[in-house]
Amino acid sequence: MVLQNELDTKPILNTKLIKDRLNILSKEENISKWDIGASSSNDVSVQVYKAEAKQLKASQRSSVTLRVWNENEMIGITSTSDLSEKGLKKALISAKAASYYANENERPNFSPLSKSDIKVKARSPIKEFGVKKLYERLKQAESDLINKHKAIIDVPYNGFSEVNYERIYVNSDGAERYLNNTQSTLYLYAKAQEVNRKPRSSGSIKIAYSSNEIDIEKCIEEAAMRTISHLDYKPIKTNKYLICFKPEAFLDLIDSFSNLFNARSILDGVSLSNKDSIGKKLSSTLLNLNDNGLHKSNIGSYEFDGEGTPTQDICIIENGKLKNFIHSEATAKQFGVLPTGHAGLGAKVSVSTDWLVISRSKNGELSNNKLDHKNSNEEFVLIENLNALHAGIKPSQGSFSLPFDGWHVKNGIKRSIESATVAGDIRAVLKGIIDIEEKQIETHSGVSPHVWVEELSITGE
């Protein structure tokens, strides 16, 4: 198969051609069962620093994962980027050889939903900006952001990119999936500093199907507003405080503890839940949680997962009770359910979330002693972003201790917090939710309202 030029957006992955080639090659190698997942993308990205180009990049990437089952139903796997006849033959031989050394306890099969009906969105061709126009727009955005306030001295982290990508899944049982999508991303992260004060930073991210749809001015305004709002900072006393999580922060926290509803984590013994947790109360009755990879705000959505299972809207928590786990084919088989469309592709298939959507349950009850928290002068901490998630989270224990960006609100006065960490246990946080606001806010990583949680430990300087 001949790959196209770097920025050519014509299809690279041809499911019929790949399927025909593998059918012929597998017979030659006496292989009766196989599947393949492949992705390809054309990327263009730019970064600037002080009106000069920091990075201008265009690339084409391809990755292929091929699995083969031997006569004993053991599975071998090979990764490659070569879709030529020679490359596929080599991958088949390697995967078959690997199957004889496979883990007998890991025997994934084809998803029973890999051939079910699926709706793939019809997408119109996108006219791309290209490197030059992306660079010009980003350079102007950097200048405009710096000019928003005299304290903003720099925009150290920024980027403007566009990507056209494809994804396929094909297996020897007749499954054949294909999708094509585009995505453009702009991020601006400003740095501000006043005399004899510590530097403060914040930013904004915007994602759309095309660069033309990116609201550059709104991104600039948000980055400036958030950065400036942290200039008037002061320390906070170590204590327990009523907490309000902004949508991005609460989504990050929930996703960091997705082992609560991840079937793979449960089977591996690293989850806070177990097989019998379905139907049990996990949180305040106010909380509804879905994983909806097809939500309209999920620009980079996939209509099927790594095993070809259709992406779905799965209710995970309803009125505070755990309703469903997310599954691959292998985990679903052990739980006696159908896969949910959350699988990767491998010998031991991973399971991960798609697009979390948090909402307020209509049947949930507010905590009686906190009914007027938003309309009073009550003291609380508003958390905007959680930092160091890779280091401050202990998923299998449920505990966290995380630096954060946010504000201390007291007597109606809102002041940025100089430096602090928030600590707690995710199970206590979920059960300690006292209010979930009505308005759902679409972010670059999911959908959530502001979420209010009863007292958590805040450690100041």
Image (spheres, rainbow, N blue to C red):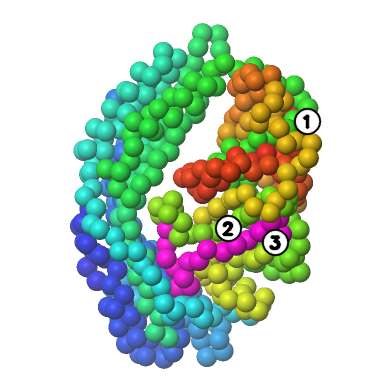
Residue at image coords 48%, 44%: 443
Q: Residues within 10 Å of mark 3 (few under 14, many from 20)?
A: many
Identify the residue at horizontal 44%, vertical 51% (top origin).
297
The residue under the point 40% across, 52% down is: 299
| Element marked by disc 1 | strand
Mark toward the viewer: 3 or 1 = 3
| Amino acid type shown at disc 1 | Lys
| Badge 3 element | strand
Which sits earlier in the primary sequence, circle 3 or circle 2? Answer: 2
Give the side of residue 124 with respect to residue 266, left or right. Answer: left
N-terminal-most mark, 3 or 1? 1
* Mark 1 crowdedness (10 Å alpha carbons): few <14, some 14-19, many ≥20: some
Q: Quadrant of the N terminus?
A: bottom left
Q: Which residue is mark 3?
A: 322
Q: Is residue 60 left or right of residue 151?
A: left
Amino acid type, residue under disc 3 in the picture: Leu
Q: Position of residue 30 (x, y in %)?
A: 41, 91
Q: Tag 2, which secondary structure?
A: strand
Q: Quadrant of residue 396?
A: bottom right
User: Where residue 37 sits in the image (x, y, percent)?
Assistant: 41, 70
Label of residue 290 in the image: 2
In this view, 307 is above or below 30 = above
Instruction: From this view, report whether residue 414 is shown above or below residue 254.
Output: above
Q: Which mark is residue 350?
A: none
Q: Which residues are magenta?
A: 301-321
Quadrant of the rendered image containing residue 403: top right
Residue that carries the numbered disc 1 in the rendered image: 240
* Towards the viewer: 333 or 450: 450
Image quadrant assignment for residue 263: bottom right
